[in-house]
Image (cartoon, rainbow, N blue to C red):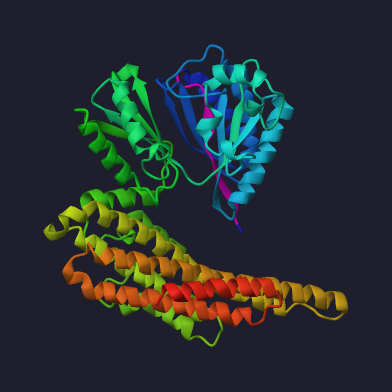
């Protein structure tokens, strides 16, 4: 399996192209590393480089970039609008394919230790790699910036690094290394130079001040353009999409007589985020990502089934129906249960999208959009669970085929069977939990959906219940083969609780 990660190191240089190029070339020199993007900002005095490739190669590239930055950047004379604590300010690792967030945490810890060994740059860990709860959030680590941290590290034990001596590198400061999900750096520019207004808007929208979940933000003064900017980090664009953030910035700006005059994305962005925003703002009817040319081309080239255009919807379902009908145990009841719940989510999306286009529901447009976003996320997760369930069953079959020629082999085989069977029980339990939550959301949706959608919502709720009950049946049959009494009791308790919620 291909292993692929992204790394987005931020360096405290955004005004000298020659220095930025030197840093980039140092990272590009590592085989197996691809430099996908580079952004410079003179007001922030910062550059953001996007790397991708094999985890070990990307880790080495980030180290070489940090070494070059140490040679070229002196934090004692650095100024800029963006908070910073080091020449290589932050180095996040993001799992893309064949890599887990735990793998990225381990890589972050290795890179952090190596930064100290090679360059004597102290390191703090953040997000998933944080070693202390108060360092999960990057803003806590960067509090006071380079100058404040330089003084605090000498006298405050709580501000000392996770790796290295309690003093900043003389010129490179410190580096913050972490592991996280895909982050979108999204900035909205206002038609005013008053950074105070930008700060008020930032406070209103960020989660730490009671705003939107997964949003971090601050006001920034763009002196070169005589504008104020709301600088935003969006840490989960599927749960809090870009369009919702933009709309809230716009509404908050109106309170102060300001309006957005443009927005920008720093670095790269998932295509799905753009598709979600396009669907929201354009109010496209019956839009599907399959209508995007590049998506369709990728599907064709990868051998995926092509969407039917002859009006025969059965052509879309036929491959899965045929796979279920095969005389093999997987895909079986677990996968079908996940599909049933996924169909409930898809129907719910349809209801939300059509309802928000009707004049009778105009008062509920924002709420309908929230339901749509949540239903879309749930449907995606349930779609993935179709394969996860089949894979968990395959793992059980592999365990049963292990040799049992002597007592040691028999013991190892039994341990493998027990472990795989637990996995085969946990996957459908997750499906049941998602289906139950989905059912609850569909009930909420009914209160604000168009009356003409009532029958569709009824079908969606029934499918969610069917998916949940089918998944629970798969949990129970796997529990029968387990010897861990405490585990079985705990799982049965969860099953009973879910059945009560579905009554």
Residue 246 drawn at (x, y percent): 29, 40
Q: In this view, does 400 lie above or below 148?
A: below
Q: Residue at the location (26% across, 54% down)?
A: 367
Q: Quadrant of the C terminus?
A: bottom left
Q: Residue at the location (42% across, 81% down)?
A: 321
Q: Give the range drawn in magenta.
A: 2-15
Q: Residue at the location (31% across, 54% down)?
A: 370
Residue 178 drawn at (x, y percent): 59, 39
Q: In this view, does 377 lie above or below 454?
A: above
On the picture, is 166 further left or further right than 201?
Answer: right
Residue 260 drawn at (x, y percent): 24, 32
Residue 135 drawn at (x, y percent): 58, 36
Q: Quadrant of the N terminus?
A: bottom right
- Give the residue at the far bottom of this rendering: 327
Q: Is residue 127 above or below residue 341?
A: above
Report the front residue among 94 and 440: 440
| Location of residue 402 by image quarter | bottom right
| Location of residue 67 by image quarter | top right
On the picture, is 138 further left or further right than 306?
Answer: right
Asked whether residue 306 appears in the rendered view, the answer is no
- Give the residue at the far left of this rendering: 359
127 drawn magenta:
no
Q: Residue at the location (32% across, 79% down)?
A: 314
Q: Total number of numbered labels? A: 0
């Amino acid at each position: 399996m291909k292993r692929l990660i992204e790394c987005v190191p931020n360096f405290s240089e955004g005004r000298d192209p020659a220095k930025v190029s030197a840093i980039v070339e140092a990272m590009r020199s590592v085989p197996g590393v691809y430099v996908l993007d580079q952004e410079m900002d003179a007001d922030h005095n910062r550059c953001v480089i996007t790397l991708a490739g094999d985890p070990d190669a990307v880790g080495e590239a980030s180290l070489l970039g940090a070494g070059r930055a140490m040679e070229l950047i002196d934090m004692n004379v650095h100024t800029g609008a963006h908070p910073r604590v080091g020449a290589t300010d932050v180095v996040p690792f993001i799992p893309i394919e064949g890599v887990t967030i735990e793998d990225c945490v381990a890589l972050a810890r290795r890179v952090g230790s190596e930064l100290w060994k090679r360059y004597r740059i102290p390191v703090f860990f953040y997000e998933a790699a944080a070693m202390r709860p108060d360092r999960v959030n990057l803003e806590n680590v960067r509090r006071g910036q380079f100058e404040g941290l330089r003084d605090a590290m000498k006298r405050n034990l709580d501000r000392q690094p996770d790796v290295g001596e309690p003093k900043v590198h003389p010129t490179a400061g410190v580096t913050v290394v972490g592991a996280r999900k895909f982050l979108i750096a999204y900035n909205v520019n206002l038609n005013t130079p008053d950074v105070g207004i930008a700060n008020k808007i930032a406070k209103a929208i960020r989660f730490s001040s009671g705003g939107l979940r997964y949003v971090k933000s601050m006001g920034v003064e763009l002196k070169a353009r005589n504008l104020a900017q709301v600088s935003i980090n969006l840490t989960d664009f599927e749960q809090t999409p870009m369009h919702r953030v933009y709309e809230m910035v716009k509404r908050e700006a109106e309170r102060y007589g300001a309006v957005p005059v443009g927005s920008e994305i720093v670095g790269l962005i998932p295509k799905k985020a753009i598709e979600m925003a396009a669907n929201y703002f354009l109010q496209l009817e019956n839009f599907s990502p399959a209508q995007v040319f590049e998506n369709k081309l990728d599907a064709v080239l990868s051998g995926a089934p092509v969407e039917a255009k002859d009006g025969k919807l059965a052509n879309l379902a036929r491959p899965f129906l045929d796979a279920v009908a095969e005389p093999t145990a997987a895909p079986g009841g677990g996968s079908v249960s996940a599909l049933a719940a996924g169909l409930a989510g898809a129907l719910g999306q349809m209801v939300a999208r059509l309802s928000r286009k009707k004049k009778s529901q105009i008062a509920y447009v924002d709420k309908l959009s929230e339901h749509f976003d949540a239903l879309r996320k749930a449907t995606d997760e349930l779609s993935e669970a179709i394969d996860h369930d089949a894979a968990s069953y395959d793992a059980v079959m592999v365990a049963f085929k292990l040799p049992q020629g002597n007592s040691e082999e028999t013991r190892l085989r039994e341990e493998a069977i027990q472990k795989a069977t637990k996995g085969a029980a946990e996957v459908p339990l997750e499906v049941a939990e998602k289906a139950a939550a989905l059912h609850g959301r569909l009930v909420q949706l009914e209160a604000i959906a168009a009356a003409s959608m009532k029958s569709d919502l009824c079908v969606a709720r029934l499918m969610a219940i069917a998916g949940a009950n089918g998944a629970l049946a798969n949990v129970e049959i796997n529990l029968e083969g387990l010897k861990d009494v405490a585990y079985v009791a705990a799982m049965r308790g969860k099953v009973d609780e879910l059945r009560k919620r579905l009554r």
